[in-house]
Image: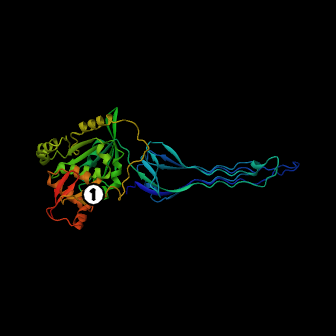
Amino acid sequence: MYFDEARIHVSSGRGGDGIVHFRREKYVPRGGPDGGNGGKGGDIIFEVDQHLNSLSPFRRNLHFSAQDGKPGGGSDKTGASGNDLVILVPAGTQIRSDSSGELLADLTEIGQRMVFLHGGRGGRGNARFANSRNQAPRMAEKGEPGQEQWVKLELRLIADVGIIGLPNAGKSTLLAAVTNARPKIASYPFTTLQPNLGVAEIDPETSLVMADIPGLIEGAHAGVGLGFQFLRHIQRTRVLIHMLDGLAQDPLADYTQINSELALFDPDLLKKPQLLVLNKIDLPEVKARLPQIEANFHSHGLDLFPVSALARSGLQELLYAAARELEAIDPGRIESTELPVYRMDQDQDFDISREPDGSWRVSGEAIERAAEMTYWEYDESVRRFQGLLATLGIEAALRQAGIETGDTVHIGEYELEWLT
């Protein structure tokens, strides 16, 4: 099981108590106050560990507490400070408030440390309260309480290149062929149940960190299948390799489906460079269809990289193309800023209204984006769009509003005829 979310309770240490104490020694009259201060409580520190790639250490352990400071002693002795608690997390971990969802920290670099909760201050002993008017104070302070909070950890993988596509397109095979990763590979849907990372060394000076993202299906943006649990990992990648199955009935429709899911989850994902890869060209039936498939993509201004991940043909050219795309991107490190986080109640709203001519208009950011990304000349793309209408509840809402066969429906700049 792969863990990329966890909810934990963290608490820093309480400060040690200061004490009331007077020096009493034989032959030392009026020794005076000598109560020491308490020690500082331990801090809660998060640190990025290069050996971790999931949040599985938090599967069973939910409570993390730093050590309390020790109380002060006589002879003006300060109590020992509590030990800090260092919590190791993988690179790409975001820390959020469990109650509000606010982003509190974004840990992206190996070795990065952050003091998340400070330990309580140690209380002062009575020696600190002595003055000319009160030379024998009988007072001290208790230690300051530590801080505590429930937080949510979310892991978003950091990789140069993310490999996306439908299940069984050959993503894991490609990762295994070009990197040191050993993902599970088989010929049934959802072989990949967790993202896999690997490093592809193109030449002595160039290497790519690549991530195989589990297969996406229609409705993934709404949590269908493996859904948005893994879509968020794509947000950290800088270049996408879009794997297409050469045996698919319509690779171009598969391409539009995945891009629609990306747009519905986070429109900024479509701004990432994409390299379109047609896999399995070593098979005779795919090789025979290759000219027709390439022509379909070229007619829409799209170029393909024909490869065989299994036979390892065409992969070197693909990797060099990915490296060139990376070079063209600002190499600055990932900043610790807020990233879009999908919630089921976001982006799914729509409005239905009547136009003056009696036609219907459906307005909504999600459905209008999907309409704009649909290839209307392809029947399968249209059917997928119809399925999206049902998934978002638009079809049921139109029926309830009284739409009839033959009515015109406007979505964005598109005009559709309603058929039952």
Q: Position of residue 258 (x, y in %)?
A: 25, 51
Direction from residue 273 to residue 284 in the image, left or right: left
Total of numbered circles in the picture?
1
Direction from residue 300 to residue 164 in the image, left or right: right
> On the image, numbered disc 1 is attached to which residue?
219
The answer to which of 30 and 370 lies nearer the viewer is 370
The answer to which quarter of the image holds residue 393 is bottom left
The answer to which of 80 and 347 lies nearer the viewer is 347
Direction from residue 297 to residue 267 in the image, left or right: right
Q: Residue at x 25, y 53 (%)?
A: 368
Rendered-image quadrant of the N terminus: bottom left
Label 1 residue SS: loop
| Badge 1 amino acid | Gly
Q: Position of residue 136 (x, y in %)?
A: 81, 52
Q: Position of residue 65 (x, y in %)?
A: 56, 55
Is 271 drawn above or below residue 154 in the view shown? above
Q: Residues within 10 Å of mark 1 (few under 14, many from 20)?
A: many
